[in-house]
């Protein structure tokens, strides 16, 4: 299997997981249940799930007032995209 397929599979899985975590946390917030720590949500974004985290934040209108999510997630996504395109340009992946 080619290395980029592993990377694509990983990124797909981590982004779906981040999106689901935002949905679960929003549901728990509405029901006053046990919440998912912000650290966990941000960690998922840092580990490659920034697109899913940003989509979850916008789709569920969750954590949109907190600067580390409102500003941090888009910046993290831009950084990850930059790294990805540089790796492609340098033919590393």
Image (tube, rainbow, N blue to C red):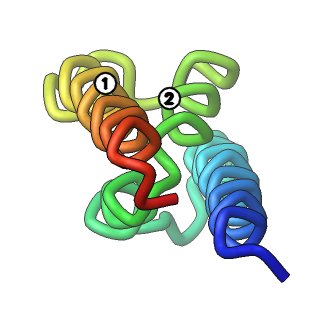
Q: Which residue is mark 1?
A: 78
Q: Position of residue 62 (x, y in %)?
A: 51, 28
Residue 11: give its label. Answer: none
Residue 30 placement: quadrant: top right
Residue closest to the far bottom: 1
- Specify few, some or many for label 1: CA neighbours under 10 Å numbering under 14, 14-19, or 20 or more: some
Q: Residue at x 24, y 34 (%)?
A: 79
Question: How many C-alpha atoms fall within 10 Å of the one at disc 2: few (<14), some, or many (≥20)?
Answer: many
**Residue under the image location 53 percent in, 71 percent down:** 34
Mark 2 and mark 1 in contact (Cβ < 8 Å)? no
Residue, far front:
91
Tag 1's secondary structure? helix
- The residue positioned 52% from the left and 40% from the top of the image is 53
Q: Compared to 13, does 61 lie above or below? A: above
**In the picture, which quadrant includes the N terminus?**
bottom right
Res. 9 image quadrant? bottom right
Horizontal relation, residue 54 to residue 1: left or right: left
Q: Residue furthest left?
A: 67
Camera-nearest label, 1 or 2: 1
Measured as percent of width and height from the top left, residue 35 is found at 49, 64
Callout 2 secondary element: helix
**In the rendered image of this protein, does residue 18 appear above or below residue 63?**
below
Height in image: 66 above or below 50? above
Q: Position of residue 59 (x, y in %)?
A: 68, 19
> Where residue 77 sits: x, y (%)?
37, 31
Residue picked out by circle 2: 54
C-alpha span from label 1 to label 2: 11 Å
68 left or right of 5 in image: left
User: What residue sits 41% from the left and 42% below the top?
Assistant: 84
If you read the primary sequence from the N terminus, does the residue marked by circle 1 or circle 2 appear first? 2
Q: 46 or 5: nearer the eye? A: 5
């Amino acid at each position: 299997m080619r290395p980029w397929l592993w990377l694509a599979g990983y990124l797909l899985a981590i982004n779906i997981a981040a999106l689901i975590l935002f949905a679960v946390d929003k549901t728990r917030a509405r029901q006053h249940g046990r919440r998912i720590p912000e650290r966990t949500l941000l960690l998922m974004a840092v580990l490659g799930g920034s697109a899913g985290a940003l989509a979850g934040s916008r789709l569920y209108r969750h954590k949109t007032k907190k600067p580390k999510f409102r500003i941090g997630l888009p910046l993290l996504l831009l950084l990850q995209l930059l790294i990805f395109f540089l790796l492609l340009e340098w033919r590393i992946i």
